[in-house]
Image (spheres, rainbow, N blue to C red):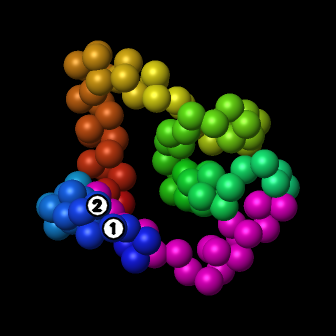
Amino acid sequence: MDELYPEQIAVVQPHINSGKFTVLEITGEELEAINLLTVTDIHLSEQDWSAYYFAEKLNAVLLTGDKRLKAIADKKRVEAHGILWLLDMLVDTTSFEKLIREVNSYQRS
């Protein structure tokens, strides 16, 4: 969280404290694995690759607006969606409840 501004920390800290958000600390081995991914496609940032890496590692949904990253995730069978998918999930109450259950089950594991 060192890269956040104090006003950003003030917004996210209550969610971290409540358990809604989880902060992942990247180990040296994970950082090395992410760095190795960055050479496979130099058009994607280290941040893009770290999101991909953890989505794959944690079997989580990758939320991205980057077509290139989504295509790579699709090819590697990592579930990836864009913001419109998230909005659809929010509009559909049943899906929203499912999304909340999935997020809660992920946080418990």
User: Considering depth in this image, is 40 or 92 the residue closer to the camera?
Assistant: 40
Q: Is residue 74 visible?
A: no
What residue would you read off at disc 2?
A: 8
User: Considering depth in this image, is 47 or 75 the residue closer to the camera?
Assistant: 47
What residue would you read off at disc 1?
A: 5
User: Considering depth in this image, is 13 or 105 the residue closer to the camera?
Assistant: 13
Q: Which residue shows up at 27% across the image and 48% down it?
A: 104
* Callout 2 crowding tier (Cα within 10 Å): few <14, some 14–19, many ≥20: few
> The N terminus appears in which quarter of the rendering?
bottom left
The stretch of residues the image draws in magenta is 21-39
Kind of residue sitting beneath label 2? Gln
> The C terminus appears in which quarter of the rendering?
bottom left
* Callout 1 crowding tier (Cα within 10 Å): few <14, some 14–19, many ≥20: few
Q: Which residue shows up at 62% across the image and 74% down it?
A: 30
Q: Is residue 62 left or right of residue 106?
A: right
Where on the picture, by quarter, is residue 12? bottom left
List x then y, in percent, for residue 97.
Answer: 23, 29
